[in-house]
Image (cartoon, helix red, strand yellow):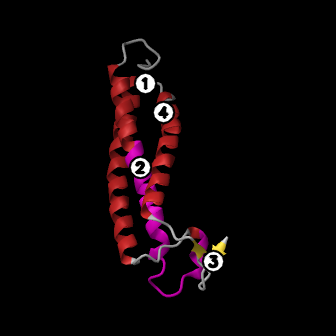
Amino acid sequence: MMVDQDGVILPRLRVRDVVRRGAVFGVIGVVPLAVAALSIGDHHDREEFLSVVGGVFLLFGALLLVIGAFFWWASAGEVRRWRDWRTITGQTGAVTVVAPMCLRVGMLLLVLGPAALGLYHVVDDAPYGSWLYSH
């Protein structure tokens, strides 16, 4: 592991890598979302859960993505990992650590939101009495 003169881990983070990792985490997160949705017994409650979760994830995902992009821009390329928290000096240094976290979580939520809404439509179109429809 290489570090620069300030003790920051090299190579520096890149936007495309952070966003790609967030998308991969979102795809992996679809499995627990589906398990959670399918564990709800009532059909109406299952649909309501999926629609609310999908909407909230899309809203907060977009918000976090915009905040993360702004923080990344404001840090002028001095973006750091969580492991570099101890290298922060000054009052505004936390932005350099929070930027990738906001981007990654925002992308994760922007992948999970449409997945929840898509699962909502699958559950809604399921024939009555099927395991997908529930009770």
Question: Which range of residues does the magenta coloring cover?
Answer: 83-112
- The residue singled out by tag 1 in the image is 42
Circle 1: element type:
loop
Q: Could you give the CA–CA distance between mark 1 and mark 2, rounded to whole angstroms?
A: 25 Å
Q: Name the mark on residue 34.
A: 4
Among numbered discs 3 and 1, the one appearing first in the sequence = 3
Q: Residue furthest right?
A: 1
Q: Mark 3 or 2, which is nearer the eye?
A: 3
The part of the image, by quadrant, that contains residue 95 is bottom left
Tag 2 near tag 4, CB within 8 Å: no
Circle 4: element type:
helix
Q: Amino acid at mark 3?
A: Val
Q: Could you give the CA–CA distance between mark 3 and mark 1, rounded to whole angstroms?
A: 54 Å
Among numbered discs 1 and 2, the one appearing first in the sequence = 1
**How packed is label 4: few (under 14 Cα within 10 Å), some, or many (20 or more)?**
some
Q: Amino acid at mark 2?
A: Leu
Name the residue rendered at 38%, 24% in the picture.
Answer: 123
Question: Does residue 85 show up magenta in the picture?
Answer: yes
Among numbered discs 1 and 4, the one appearing first in the sequence = 4
Q: Position of residue 98 (x, y in %)?
A: 47, 69
**How packed is label 1: few (under 14 Cα within 10 Å), some, or many (20 or more)?**
few
Q: Amino acid at mark 4?
A: Ala
Q: Name the mark on residue 29.
A: none
Circle 2: element type:
helix
Tag 1 near tag 4, CB within 8 Å: no
Q: Name the mark on residue 109.
A: 2
Tag 1 near tag 2, CB within 8 Å: no
Q: Mark 3 or 4, which is nearer the eye?
A: 3
Question: Does residue 98 show up magenta in the picture?
Answer: yes
Q: Could you give the CA–CA distance between mark 1 and mark 4, rounded to whole angstroms?
A: 15 Å
Q: Name the mark on residue 3.
A: 3
Among numbered discs 2 and 4, the one appearing first in the sequence = 4
